[in-house]
Image (tube, helix red, strand yellow):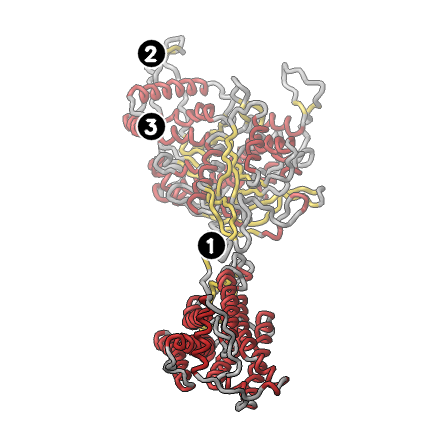
Amino acid sequence: MTSSGSGISFMSFHQIKCLHVYFNGFQSALWLRLLLWIWIGEQVDQVYTSHQNFHPHSIKIPGDITLGGLFPIHSRGPHGVNCGELKKEKGIHRMEAMLYALDQINGDPELLPNITLGARVLDTCSRDTYALEQSLTFVQALIQKDTSDIRCTNGEPPIIRKPERVVAVIGASASSVSIMVANILRLFEIPQVSYASTAPELSDNNRYDFFSRVVPPDSYQAQAMLDIVKALGWNYVSTLASEGNYGESGVEAFMQISREAGGVCIAQSVKIPREPTAGEFDKIIKRLMETSNARGVIIFANEDDIRRVLEAAQRANLTGHFLFVGSDSWGAKSSPITELEDVAEGAVTILPKRASIDGFDQYFTSRCLENNRRNIWFAEFWEDDFRCKLTRPGVKLDPEKKKCTGDERIGQDSSYEQEGKVQFVIDAVYAVAHALHNMHQDLCPGSHGVCSNMDPVEGRLLLDYIRAVNFNGSAGTSVLFNENGDAPGRYDIFQFQMTNHSHPGYHVIGQWTNNLRLNLEEMQWSGGDRSVPESICSFPCKPGERKKMVKGVPCCWHCELCDGYQYQLDEFTCETCPLDKRPAPNRTACRPTPIIKLEWNSLWALVPASIAMLGILTTSAVVITFIRFNDTPIVRASGRELSYVLLTGIFIIYLITFLMIAEPGVVVCALRRLLLGLGMAITYSSMLTKTNRIYRIFEQGKKSVTPPKFISPTSQLLITFVLISVQVFGVFVWFAVIPPHTIIDYEELRPPNPDLARGILKCDMSDMSIICCLSYSIVLMVTCTVYAVKSRGVPETFNEAKPIGFTMYTTCIVWLAFVPIFFGTAQSTEKMFIQTATLTISMSLSASVSLGMLYMPKVYVIIFHPEQNVQKRKRSFKAVVQAAKSLTEKQNGDMKIEPDRSQ
C-alpha cells in the first residue's frame, strides 16, 4: 500500500479538547501541544501499520470485550537496546496470572455470562518510554484514520482490519511506567488498574483520574514503615531511594509523614542514580557512615540496587551495622539477598498482605510448550527456567547447553515459588470484570452478550463502576477503592532471620492495617541477638540531666547535668530547688534540707561548756567564801555590796554559755537577748562605778579637803543599777519591736556541694544584733578602762585601782582578739559553731579575768592567810588628801614622798 497524503492521524474534537486541557496544566505554549498531537498521530500510525502484520511483543486473546495488559516481561536493555533479559517472576508469573484470571472469569457462569473477555498483553521491558510507545496500541481503535488517499498496487482501496477496542488496561508494574501510560490513557478515557504501582503521586485524582490500583499507595507503606521505626525505638534513620517515581516518591512520603508526626529525624537522604557509575555504591555506604549512629536505613529501591547496596556494605566490612527497613520492592524476595544473607540479617521488610493462590499454582505448574502456545514468551521462559535450548529451524544449537525435551515440568525439574504480586494481578482483572458485570446488568438488563448500550463501552462510566466495586478477592480479602482509586492499606511485616546461621528465611513478625501490630519477641538481629539495636542520634540523658537540643535537628541533643542546687524539672529544663530544699541524689526532685543545731556532745559545745562550768563553780566558791566571811575586814574593804553585784554579773556571763548552746526556742531566745549583754553590763557597770569613785576621790583630794558626792555604798549601788537599767531598757525595746522567735537559716550553710547543705535552727539574732547587744557593755568596758588608766598612779595601799586596771587591759585584749575571729569565720561551713564557741569562750575568759584579778587574791588571803584578814587603822579623808598631794608632787618631780603607812 502507498500513501499520497501526509500520514498524520486525526482525532475527534472531544479528544483534542481533552488533550488541550491536560497539557495546559503543564505547558501553556500552543506549539508544544501541537507537536505532541502530531507525535501521537505519527506513533499510532506506525503502531497501527506494524500490527497489520506481526507484533513480536504482544499477546492477542480474542473476546467480546478486550482488556489491555502491561507487564515487565523483560528487563531494561543496555544502552541502545530496548529490552534485556527475561524476568521470570515479575514478568511471566504476573502475565500468566492475568491469563489465568481471564480463564476463570470466562468459565464462571455467574460473572459476565455469555460475554467473553479477551486481552491484548504488551511487554514494557521495564522502561517507561518504551511502555508509552507500546501503549499507543490501546488507543489506535479510538483514532479516526483517513484512508481515502491509500490505494493498493492494483488501485483498489485496502481492506484494513479494524483494531480491537481496549476498554481498560491492567498494569503497569513500575510506578514510573504507570505514570507515563496514565498520561495517555486519561486522554482517551481508558480506565487503568495497576497491580503493583505504589507511588503516592498516582493518588492525585486531578492528574491521574482514570488510574486505580489494587495495592495500597506508598503513603500507607511509608506510614507503616514509620510506625515500625517508632515501635523499634529508633528516632534517627537514613533513607535510600532508587532514582525514579517509585523510590523518590516513597522516600518523600516517608519524610513528609515523619515530619508531620514528629519523633523521627532523617540523618541522610541518598538517591541511587538510574545509571550508577563504578564505585557509586561504595560512595553511598561511605556517606551513610558519616552519620554512623543512624544505623536504620529506610530503603525504597529496586532489586538490583538493593543487592548492590548489600554488596557494598559487605565490601566495607559493615556486616551487621546497618538495619534495613525495606519497602515492598524488597518484600520477601530471595534474589536481592542471595549469598548476602549475613549482611541482610535482621532486615525488616514490608509487603502488601497477600496469600498464595493455590489455583494459580496448579495452573502454572501444568503449563508446557504444548498447552501454552498463546504465550509468545513462554518458549523463552522455558529455556531460561530449565537452562536448556529449544531447537529452531535455521538456528544452530549451542553445544554448551542441553537440548530441551519438552517433557520438563515446572516445580519438578526447576524451582518454583509463586511471585508476590500474582494475587493483585488476579484481583485487578476481577475488579474490571465485576465493574463490567455491574455495568451490563444496569445497561443491558436481560440481554445476553454485549448490547448496543455497551458498544462501545464508555470509559468514564466504566471508571465509576470500577471505583464502586466491593468483592472478596482471590485471597479472601475485600477489594475496593477509595475516592482516589487507592486500595486500603494491608501489609504483612517480615524479618529476614538466620537460625543458627544455616536456615535463613523471612518470618512474619507483624501486620499493619491502619495501625501496627508488631511482635518484638519474635524479632532476631545480627548474630542471633534478640535485643533491639539502637538507631538514635543521641542516647537518652541520665536522670538529673537535661537535653540541650541541636539546632535544626530535633532528634539530636547534648546532655547537660543539672548542677548546684538545680533539679530536672522536665527533659529540657533544670530548675533551682526552693531555699529549704536540696536536689535528690539523682537530681530528679528536691528533698528537704536537714535541720541541725549545736549539739551538747559536739566539741564546739563541750569546750565552752566546760570552761563555763568551771567558772560557775569558781564564782560560786567565791560568793560562798564572801558570804561566809562577810564581816571580815577584807570583804568589807572590797565593797561588799558592789562585789556581790559584780559577782552576779560574772555568774550570768558564765551562765549565758549554756543558753547559747541550748536548743533554740522562744524562751531560750528571750533569755539570750536578755542575759547576753546583761551579765557584762552588770560586771562592767560595777567596775566603772568603782574606778569612777576612786578617780573622783583622788581628784577631789587634790583640790580640797571636802569629800566628793555619791561615794557611799548606797550611792554606788544606785549608780550601778542606773547603768544596768540602760541595758535592760534597750533589751525590752527590742522585745517590743521584734518579739523573740526561732528561725531556720538555710543560707548560712549552703556550700557548692548540695549534699553538705543544712538548715540551721537558731534564734533570730544576726551577727550585728549580737554586736549591738554587747555594744553597751563594750562602751562600759572602754570607759572603765579609761578611768583605770587615769587612776593608775593611785597608791596601791588605798584601793583596787590597779587590779581593776589590769583586769580591763586584759579584757580589752580578749575582746580585740574576739572581733576578727568572730567576723573572719563568716564564710566557713561551720560558722555558727565557731562563732558560738568564740563568743562564749571570750565572755568566759573576760569573766575569768575579772574573777581572777579582783577576787582570787582576796579569797586566797581569807582561806590560806587568815592572820592578814585583820582590822587596820581607819584612814580618814585627810590622809587621802595628803596622799593625793604627795602623788601630785611626785608626778611634778619636786620631791619624793613616802606614803604615810601609820595612818
In-image side of 318 versus 201 (left or right): right
x 54%, y 44%: residue? 536
Indicate the position of residue 46 as horizontal and vertical percent values.
42, 18
Query: Which amino acid type corresponds to the residue marked 2 in the rendered image?
Result: Gly
Residue under numbered circle 2? 5
Q: Which of 315/814 is in front?
A: 814
* C-alpha span from label 2 to label 1: 86 Å
Q: Which residue is mark 3?
A: 26
Is 547 placed left or right of 462 in the picture?
Answer: right
Horizontal arrangement in the rendering, residue 386 relative to residue 193 (left or right): right
Residue 342 visible at all:
yes
Q: CA distance from mark 2 to mark 3?
A: 32 Å
- Amino acid type, label 1: Cys
Specify few, some or many for label 2: CA neighbours under 10 Å numbering under 14, 14-19, or 20 or more: few
Secondary structure at numbered mark 1: strand
Which secondary structure, mark 3? Answer: loop
Whichever of labels 2 and 1 marks the residue nearer the N terminus, that label is 2
User: To which quarter of the image does residue 351 belong?
Assistant: top right
Q: Residue at x 55, y 34 (%)?
A: 290
Quarter of the rendering containing residue 861: bottom right
- State the image quarter where residue 677 is shown: bottom left
**Pointer 2 and pointer 1: residues touching (CB < 8 Å)?**
no
Q: Amino acid at mark 3?
A: Phe
| Residue extending farthest front | 895
Q: Quadrant of the N terminus?
A: top left
The image position of residue 784, as x and y in percent, is: 44, 72
Q: Nearer the viewer, residue 291 or 569?
A: 569
Q: Does residue 299 sit above or below 513 in this rendering? A: above
Residue bearing mark 1 = 574
Is residue 801 shown above or below 559? Answer: below
Residue at the location (47% across, 31% down)? 69
Depth order, front residue of 243/550: 550
